[in-house]
Each structure stands twice: as structure tokens, then as C-alpha cells.
Image: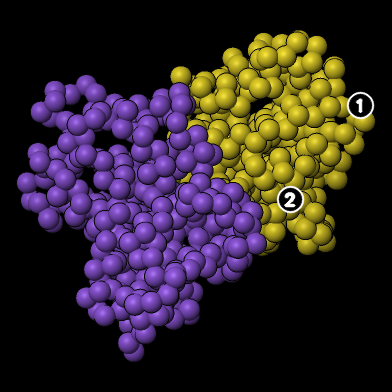
Chain colours: A yellow, B purple
């Protein structure tokens, strides 16, 4: 079945992190209607097993499919890393787009030396999806992937700058960037978790001004736009809209999500759904 | 139905934090058989809504009841704060013991001034259970309750000492302890989350040497022992044993749980169960 151009785009994440991707999507595609689902009852995905994350991702995707979406964006790095295959297999009639491949593409384009660092959740690093996606594009690439789990909690607490955030950024990044000769340092750093763009300024102060910082939100949004245009699926009129759903605690979703979306969210805008 | 003395004791938590309570229980009750269930597929509970936490707690309790437990310990502050009533109502034939009441009891005994600080998860603080339990015992008490969500991530990362942990401890505790006249500072601090005892040394350096630090694990274990003895339910022989179950990722449970239990856990010791 071909979906109409005016059908919505489904976006899901384990929680509020995917709102950084949604923000980029809305900027690239201002006429589109978005349906966003945050699986806040079961977040975080980043410390859970691949089997569990894949099962949760599939449930979220199937729920979004019920809204007749014309395209499904997996706006969570962990779910993209370990659940994209199973979701794509089940949801066959619309494009299913994750954040890993666009992120890897952007990293390969940004890097001159081919030495690329990836910071992500435990689950994303362990699954090796970024490492694979980068080396598939550039066989000369050297990838240093490091889990940076505390950044998730920092972003949710809103502690994105200041001495605590800097201390934690040094803890994770100094082994990658500080003590090496310039020639053996990565020249590109992938923010492989949708929470991490919130900490980009702090991360930059530690990684240094010469390092290209790649945030997959932007490249994913461009990739979604190209996919819709290629399939004659992009909305041609309309003012755009956003429907927000969460599996738990609308009040917390609104409070923390507003920082990620960079606009206030009122709790009653967030529908509580059960998966 | 009266359970036999040799029946096991069920203990549950959202993840590995409750192992601090289990350790105290095993020290108080070395002859007992313990069945521990960590709901790692859905942790953390501390940021989720009361309704969701109560539902998860009930599922975990009902699973443990299938093992014929003679006593059920809710070794998670958030689940005790918002789920104990519903669990006690459903599981009626055995004592159901949470960690909040014993923690509040210990705090009231430790405090001379009646000014008691509680640090806990967002959910525990918001629910107000510690505040209520303390004031019910001491109507003159003044309770300052503060959410300290990052401590959970720090304990799971094993970053319990050093400058990062100290920076975060200062962030949460200095507003409570530092800038006040000695007479208006709390004289007692309740560690209202089972993760926080891992950070006790760091917390002490910030709170100061005069503050009594109350960890509900010890008092809960003593309360469980008294309850079993009063009901003629304590094991009279046996060497004690421990059966570990988790709803996700046995490898991670073993790796992080070993630090909480202070003995190595091998991944194959951890049974994967579905709730």
C-alpha cells in the first residue's frame, strides 16, 4: 500500500533523547505531521540486552504503524544498533530509518585521517553497529568506541555545562584525546546517543577545537527528507504538527523533553499510551 | 497457610541496588535461603510514575510468591514508597516488608535535633513516603528531602569515589549542609536509595563527620529478623543459600551486582526470567 503524502511520520525513542532528532526533522521538513513515541516506562535502552531492546523497539514501531505513518524513524541509537533489522522486517510497507547509518556516513565524510571516535551507550558500543557501519564505508578507518553512560543521566538532569559535566567529559574523553600525539588522535567524534548533543559544548571543550563533532540528528533528518522526496512522499502543503506520546509520566516527559526540543512542552500535550 | 521455616525469603528490587539489602539480610540471617529478583529489564524505577512502579512491583512480588516464600522484602526505596500498599494487599499470607519504615525508624532514633535530610530518587522524594514515615514517628521532625538521581548512575558505573563523585555529592549536599549555621543543619542523613550506600564514604566527606548517616539496609535486615522470629518463621538449621534472578542481561547484573554484593557473581549464577 502506498501511503498518502499527508500521512504522518512516526518517530520513536526510548524516552526524550529522540526529540533532538525530531527537532532536526521538523527543521528540514516543516510541512510534515509527526507522531513521536517515547518509551519512558522502560527507558533507558542503553544498558539493556539486544534481545530486550529489539522486542521493545518492535512494540513501539507496531504502535506507530497503527497511525498510518508513511515513514518510521528509529530516533534512538541503541534501538537502531540492535533493533533496526527486526523492525524493518516486520514493518515492510514504509521506509524504516535508523540513526546509525546516517551518523556513520557523516563521520566518514568529516574525517580526513580515518580515525573516528564514537561515544555511545553501553548497548550501542557493545553491539558494534557504528564500528561496522563506518568500516563498511571506509575500509581504512580506525574506530575507537567508548561507552559514556553517565552523559545520559547528566542530560536528563539538565547538568550539561559546569564543572560536573566537564569532569565527566574529561573522564570519558581524555583517554581518547588528551594524552596522544596529535597524529594519533581521532579527528572526528560521533555523538552516538541522542542525549549527547545536549552536552556538545562541554564535549568540545575537552575534545578540542580541531575535532569534527558529528551529531546524527542532522544527517538523519536530511536522509529522511531525501527518502521522502525520492518516493514522492513529502508533504506538499500543510503547516506541520506534532503529536507526543509516552508510555509513562507525561509530566516528567514534558519537563525534561522541553529542554531537548528547545520549546516548552505542556504535560497535557503528552498522551499516555501502553505498549 | 503457614509457610515452613525452611521456605525461602523473597527479595526484589528494580535491579542490583537491592543487593546492598540482601547483603545485610544474609549477615543477619545466615541460615536462610534467599531468592532475589532484579527487574533489570525495566529499571530504573526512580524516574517512573507511581502507577507504573506499583504495577511492576506487583508483578515482581507475584513472581516471587510462586517460589513459596515465607516473607517478601521490597528492597527498593521507590517500590517501597509507592508500591508497598498494593503489594501487601495482594500478597496477604506472608509478611511484606519495605525499606522506608525501617529507614525512617532508624533516622528518628539517630537524630537529636529532629532535623533529618533524605536523599533519594525523584520518585521516592515526590511520593513523600519518607517524610510521612518520619513525621508519623516524630511530630517535631523537620525533613529536607532532595532527589539525587545522578548517584544511581555513578554507583552503577562504579564511580563511587574521586573528584567526579565528590563534585556530584557537593552539588546535591552542599545546599543542605554547607552554607548553614551548624544549628540549622540536619544532624541525620538518610540514604533513601539502595544504590547510595556505595557512595557513603564520598557522601560523608561532604556532609561532614557530625552527621549520622542512616542506611536502611541494616535496619531493614534487623526488622526482617525480628519479624521472622516473632512468627516462629526463622530457619533453625541450614547453611543459607542465594538464588539470583534478573529480567534482563545476566552478564551486566553479574558485573555490576558483584560490587553491590561485595562478592563476585558469575553470569551463569543469574537466571533470566520474564515478568
In this rendering, position of residue A65 left or right of residue B102: right
Q: Position of residue A253 (x, y in %)?
A: 47, 45
Badge 2 marks a residue whose secondary structure is helix
The mark nearer the N terminus, 1 or 2, is 2
In this rendering, position of residue B140 left or right of residue A31: left
Instruction: Please give the label number shown on residue A140.
Output: 1
- Few, some or many residues within 10 Å of mark 2 (<14, 14–19, 20+): many
Name the subunit of mark 2: A
Q: Position of residue A212 (x, y in %)?
A: 73, 18
> Which residue has dot 2 on it?
A82
Residue B206 visible from this viewpoint: yes
Q: Residue furthest left?
A: B140
Q: Is residue B93 above or below residue A136?
A: below
Residue visible at 37% across and 32% down in the picture: B202
Give A181 or B150, whichever is nearer the viewer: A181
Residue B249 visible from this viewpoint: no
Q: Position of residue A216 (x, y in %)?
A: 71, 32
Assess whether mark 2 and mark 1 are in contact (beta carbons under 8 angstroms).
no
Residue visible at 48% across and 49% down in the picture: B262
Using the rendered image, report if marks 1 and 2 lie on a common chain.
yes
Name the subunit of mark 1: A
Badge 1 marks a residue whose secondary structure is loop
Q: CA distance from mark 1 to mark 2?
A: 24 Å
Residue visible at 42% across and 65% down in the picture: B11
Residue visible at 27% across and 61% down in the picture: B222
Give B21 or A226, whichever is nearer the viewer: B21
Q: Is residue B71 above or below residue A48?
A: below
Image quarter (top left, top right, bottom left or bottom right) of the N terminus of chain B? bottom left
Amino acid at each position: 500500500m502506498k501511503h498518502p503524502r499527508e500521512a504522518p511520520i512516526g518517530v520513536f525513542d526510548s524516552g526524550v533523547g529522540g526529540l533532538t532528532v525530531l527537532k532536526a526533522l521538523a527543521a528540514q521538513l516543516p510541512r510534515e505531521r509527526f507522531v513521536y513515541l517515547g518509551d519512558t516506562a522502560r527507558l533507558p535502552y542503553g544498558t539493556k540486552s539486544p534481545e530486550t531492546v529489539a522486542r521493545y523497539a518492535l512494540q513501539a514501531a507496531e504502535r506507530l504503524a497503527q497511525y498510518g505513518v508513511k515513514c518510521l524513524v528509529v530516533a534512538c541509537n541503541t534501538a537502531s544498533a540492535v533493533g533496526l533489522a527486526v523492525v524493518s522486517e516486520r514493518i515492510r510497507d514504509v521506509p524504516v530509518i535508523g540513526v546509525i547509518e546516517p551518523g556513520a556516513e557523516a563521520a566518514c565524510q568529516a574525517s580526513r585521517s580515518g580515525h573516528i571516535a564514537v561515544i555511545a551507550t553501553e548497548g550501542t558500543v557493545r553491539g558494534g553497529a557504528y564500528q561496522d557501519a563506518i568500516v563498511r564505508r571506509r575500509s581504512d578507518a580506525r574506530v575507537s568506541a567508548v561507552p559514556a553512560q553517565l552523559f545520559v543521566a547528566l542530560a536528563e538532569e539538565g547538568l550539561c555545562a559546569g564543572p560536573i559535566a566537564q569532569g565527566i567529559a574529561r573522564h570519558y574523553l581524555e583517554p581518547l584525546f588528551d594524552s596522544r600525539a596529535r597524529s594519533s588522535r581521532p579527528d572526528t567524534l560521533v555523538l552516538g546517543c541522542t542525549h549527547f548533543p545536549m552536552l556538545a559544548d562541554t564535549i568540545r571543550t575537552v575534545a578540542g577545537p580541531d575535532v569534527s563533532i558529528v551529531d546524527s540528528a542532522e544527517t538523519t533528518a536530511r536522509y529522511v527528507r531525501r527518502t521522502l522526496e525520492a518516493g514522492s512522499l513529502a508533504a506538499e502543503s500543510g503547516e506541520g504538527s506534532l503529536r507526543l506520546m509516552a508510555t509513562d509520566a507525561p509530566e516528567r516527559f514534558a519537563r525534561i523533553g522541553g529542554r531537548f526540543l528547545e520549546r516548552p512542552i505542556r504535560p497535557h500535550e503528552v498522551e499516555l499510551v501502553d505498549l
